[in-house]
DNA sequence: AGATGACCTCCTGTATACGATTAGTCCGAT
DNA sequence: ATCGGACTAATCGTATACAGGAGGTCATCT
């Protein structure tokens, strides 16, 4: 490992493995219910079992992996109900995040919102769809960070990744329509209108829920 | 390890270590900012470093531990602001939990609520204060589980433990008064009154916040 | 043929070993 | 006396080793 990262900025193998496994789960490369055999993952990633094991514990705490003692780890299974349930949590949490972000408008992290919006606009227009999904999550998380509540942001990260996972599974990409709602939410936050920001955040999640339900009820995904 | 636990019910060392470390953090035996040296913890608990390392990752994901690569782990520090911030999150999340629990009244997990209430009443009357704190967390978590939303319950567990941690640090035990509010919340849930259940849950957290603020503003804790 | 039991393989759980980096300490030079 | 640099101890990051449980397979018995 001739690696030039210095000091605390060093990225350990366990972090790289965690991010890579999470990415593979979110993208569907690792399917729901698939076994995660430590030896094989370690060999595939070119590391020993230890970093893999530590990653598995973290991803289990985040709810992406199910671990049974002495049996092993599998990618979690997400029933349709569990998918739908998440939206209730999101409405409560993201509504709060939007309200607090509006209250704190103009903070440094609020600028990040505009930045993500611009990146997303560009990605949508270029048709880079996988990137759009990541930026979608990034925007929602940026709202959480703009709220200036550290635990809220800590908690939202796995929640939003789980949401991204659900959408990647159901192939219900909302794309451009979704970004107009983001823009609208951003305006309310910038205006410092707490009630409106919360309402728009909740409405946005509710719209995502409808899109999810349409996609799961019918074979053909609603691609609005 | 001549240990008779069978099958999936087996408790691994990492689980035991995780629970023990979490307990020590919540109780204050491990102070904020204290270094967690893997070797020493392993020796103190009579295990090797591996279970300890895996525990550290989990507790870091839950927000109780801060890890800096190549430097080590320390018990997280909680500023007064961070403590206060948590209450905003709790009001949003626990309000939702109470509403959903009221919607689902009569489910199997709703019976658990009554059970915890009874245990707590007994513990309060016997003056077993440490147990009361644990039961307090257990009650709030039981509301989360009665909501019938798996991710909500998953998310609430570390959140409530964090709340318990904060209270143990500030020595702001609310005791009996708190349990009357619990009883009142339980009644609203049992009655299936969603609005009232949410309102009472939010009010309960708001009262806890006031108690927390009073305890942090003044040296002498408000012990209502 | 179906059921039962022994064996065997795979894999997890745990421990130990070693390399690398950090931070503290001591010494010398200015 | 203070600053800088080299040495050293402490401790993390990673790899490897080994024991024991879980599940499958095959043969044998009924």
Image (spheres, coloured by chain):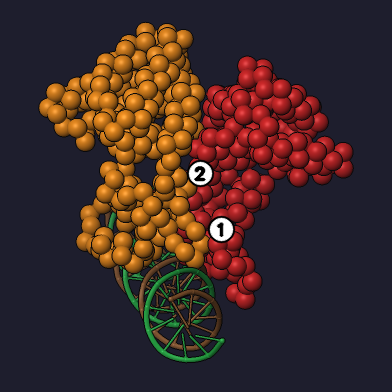
Chain colours: A orange, B red, C brown, D green
Q: Sort mark 1 into few (<14), some (14-19) or many (20+) by Cα contacts within 10 Å.
A: some
- The quarter holding residue A105 reads top left
- For this orientation, the residue located farthest to the left is A126
- The quarter holding residue A109 reads top left
Q: Is residue A23 visible?
A: no
Q: Is residue B92 visible?
A: yes
Q: Position of residue A122 (x, y in %)?
A: 16, 24
Which of these two is toward me, A87 or A221? A221
Which of these two is toward me, B192 or C29? B192
Q: Please indicate whether residue D4 sits to the left or right of residue A63 in the image.
A: left
Which of these two is toward me, A119 or B111? B111
Residue topped by disc 2: B62
Q: Please indicate whether residue A215 sits to the left or right of residue A198 in the image.
A: left
Residue topped by disc 1: B15
Q: How many numbered badges does the structure rendering display? A: 2
Q: Chain of mark 2?
A: B
CB-based contact (under 8 Å), mark 2 and mark 1: no
Q: Please indicate whether residue B9 sits to the left or right of residue A125 in the image.
A: right
Which callout, 2 or 1, points to the residue nearer the camera?
A: 1
- For this orientation, the residue located farthest to the right is B126
Q: Identify whether A172 is placed above or below A165.
A: above
Residue at the location (26% across, 18% down)? A177
Q: Chain of mark 1?
A: B
């Amino acid at each position: 490992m001739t690696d030039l990262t210095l000091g605390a900025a060093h990225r350990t193998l366990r972090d790289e493995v965690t991010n890579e496994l999470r990415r593979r789960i979110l993208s569907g490369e690792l399917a729901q219910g698939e076994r995660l055999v430590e030896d094989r993952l370690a060999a595939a990633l070119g590391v020993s079992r230890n970093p893999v094991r530590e990653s598995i514990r973290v991803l289990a705490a985040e709810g992406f992996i199910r671990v049974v003692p002495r049996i092993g780890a599998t990618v979690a299974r997400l029933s349709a109900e569990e998918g739908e349930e998440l939206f209730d949590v999101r409405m409560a949490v993201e509504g709060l995040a939007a309200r607090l972000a509006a209250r704190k408008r103009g903070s440094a992290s609020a600028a990040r919102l505009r930045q993500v919006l611009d990146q997303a606009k560009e990605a949508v227009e270029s048709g880079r769809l996988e990137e759009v999904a990541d930026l979608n999550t990034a925007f929602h998380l940026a709202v959480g960070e703009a709220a200036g509540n550290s635990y809220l942001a800590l908690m939202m990260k796995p929640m939003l990744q789980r949401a991204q996972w659900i959408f990647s599974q159901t192939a219900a990409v909302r794309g451009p329509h979704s970004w107009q709602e983001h823009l609208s939410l951003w305006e309310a936050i910038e205006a410092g209108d707490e009630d409106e920001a919360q309402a728009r955040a909740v409405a946005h999640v509710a719209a995502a829920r409808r899109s999810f339900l349409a996609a799961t009820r019918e074979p053909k995904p609603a691609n609005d």
